[in-house]
Image (cartoon, grey):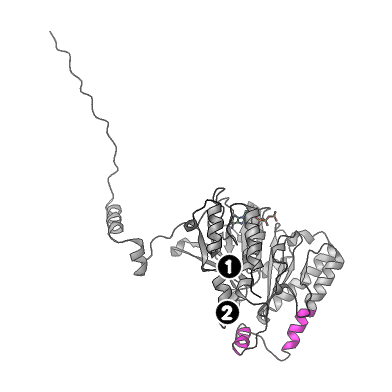
């Protein structure tokens, strides 16, 4: 009689990929040599990815380090403070305190977020330079182009929070055209008034309002020229004046939602003239920032577009991206505040822009921003 063969159950096999030699080596080195020790010794690992805002955590990246008060906000919102990344390693209070204590230099290098430079294996602070501190070709007017609800107003808020915190009103004067009231939180700050006490602010709703505003700016620019009639301005002049104790204020014009003036012929002609005057007098400390939701020449005059040496693109469609950046090797993911930047050296990189303040919702962030600005030391 034939015996029934016994079939032994074979244990399930787990397929283990053999460790490549270099992986094993990296693992052993990482275990023995921590990231912190390596950094202290000047050795950098592959940089961390750009922080990604999500619905649950919309504010992983903010401008200033949170203060105690912010800790309370964060706790109320059940968010771990340590999860925040700040692009300035100081609280806003510390920066405010420094500006009245230190002899600061004029600077239009504005921290706006983090930049990813894979070819250099670097993730760095993203600074926009409106002046060109390292030479006239390294800075210039900024254009922020983005679809609706892509973060254009937020960039302006972060920029203004930095500048009005860093500089006293005598060191920085700002003028704003804000048709949709997106910068109203800054309205009361003294930086937005000229020496006569006129508010340099308009929504440009009517031709009269816009003309009145442009006349005020033209007078302001003339006054600035007349203050130094024989001065030949170059990139370093403003800095030299400040170091001699002559604090001639830097002057920034912001035109928000430029596209909204396109249909109004006389308004758009007057705006173009104003923008070009500012662009041409950069070495005298006059700077321009424009935002727009449209990139076509119907909306932004090509003369202005070509002079904006730094461009940020947020949630652009293919055609707009091509117009601003040419063919790019990557398309940014649809993440709030994630965008492309092209700098005066014609390099395209990916950036993650910071929020001005913490807050789980837009209304909370708005409230925090207003509270912050209310305690600005004049
Ligand atoms: N850097 C960022 N990180 C996280 N969320 C952001 C960032 N920038 C913008 N957002 C969020 O995206 C939304 C739209 O932002 P914002 O209002 O600045 O866009 P916009 O382009 O000015 O919009 P609109 O076209 O309506 O004027 C807001 O809820 C804002 O809080």
- The percent position of residue 349, horizontal first and vertical second, equals 54, 61
Looking at the rendering, the stretch of residues picked out in magenta corresponds to 219-248
Answer above or below: position of 77 versus 375. above
Cα separation between marks 2 and 1: 14 Å
x, y percentage for residue 370? 66, 62
Q: Residues within 10 Å of mark 2 (few under 14, many from 20)?
A: few
Q: Residue at x 80, y 79 (%)?
A: 219
- The picture places residue 59, in percent across and down from the top left corner, at 56, 55
Residue situated in front as seen by the camera: 241 or 314 = 241
Q: Which mark is residue 135?
A: 2
Q: Quadrant of residue 131?
A: bottom right
Task: State the residue position of label 1.
Answer: 343
Residue at the limit of the structure toward the top, as seen here: 1
Furthest residue in direction bottom, as rendered: 230
Q: Secondary structure at mark 1?
A: loop
Identify the residue at horizontal 71%, vertical 92% (top origin): 230
Q: Quadrant for ligand 1?
A: bottom right
């Amino acid at each position: 009689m034939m015996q029934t063969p016994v079939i032994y159950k074979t244990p399930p096999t787990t397929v283990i990929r053999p460790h490549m030699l270099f992986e094993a080596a990296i693992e052993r080195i990482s275990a023995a040599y921590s990231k912190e020790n390596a950094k202290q010794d000047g050795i950098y690992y592959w940089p961390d990815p750009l922080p990604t805002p999500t619905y649950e955590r919309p504010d992983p990246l903010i401008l200033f380090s949170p203060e105690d008060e912010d800790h309370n906000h964060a706790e109320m919102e059940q968010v771990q403070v340590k999860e925040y990344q700040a692009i300035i390693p100081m609280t806003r209070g510390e920066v405010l305190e420094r500006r009245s204590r230190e002899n600061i230099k004029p600077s239009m290098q504005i921290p706006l977020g983090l930049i990813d430079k894979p070819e250099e294996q670097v993730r760095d602070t993203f600074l926009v330079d409106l002046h060109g501190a390292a030479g006239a070709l390294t800075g210039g007017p900024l254009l922020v182009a983005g679809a609706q609800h892509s973060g254009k107003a937020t960039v302006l808020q972060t920029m203004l929070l930095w500048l009005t915190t860093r500089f006293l009103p005598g060191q920085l004067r700002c003028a704003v055209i804000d048709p949709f009231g997106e910068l109203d939180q800054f309205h009361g700050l003294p930086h937005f008034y000229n020496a006569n006490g006129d508010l340099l602010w308009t929504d440009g709703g009517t031709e009269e309002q816009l003309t009145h505003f442009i006349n005020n700016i033209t007078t302001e620019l003339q006054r600035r020229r007349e203050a130094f009639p024989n001065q030949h301005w170059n990139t370093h002049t403003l800095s030299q004046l400040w170091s001699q104790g002559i604090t001639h204020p830097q002057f920034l014009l912001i035109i928000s939602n430029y596209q909204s003036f396109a249909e109004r012929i006389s308004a758009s002609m007057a705006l173009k003239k104003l923008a070009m005057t500012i662009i041409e007098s950069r070495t005298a400390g006059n700077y321009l920032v424009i935002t727009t939701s449209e990139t076509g020449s119907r909306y932004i005059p090509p003369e202005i577009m070509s002079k904006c040496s730094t461009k940020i693109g947020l949630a652009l469609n293919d055609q707009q991206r091509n117009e601003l950046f040419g063919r790019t090797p990557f398309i940014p993911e649809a993440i709030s505040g994630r965008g492309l930047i092209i700098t005066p050296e014609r390099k395209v990189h990916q950036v993650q822009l910071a929020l001005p303040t913490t807050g789980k919702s837009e209304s909370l962030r708005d409230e925090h921003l207003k509270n912050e600005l209310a305690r600005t030391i004049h």
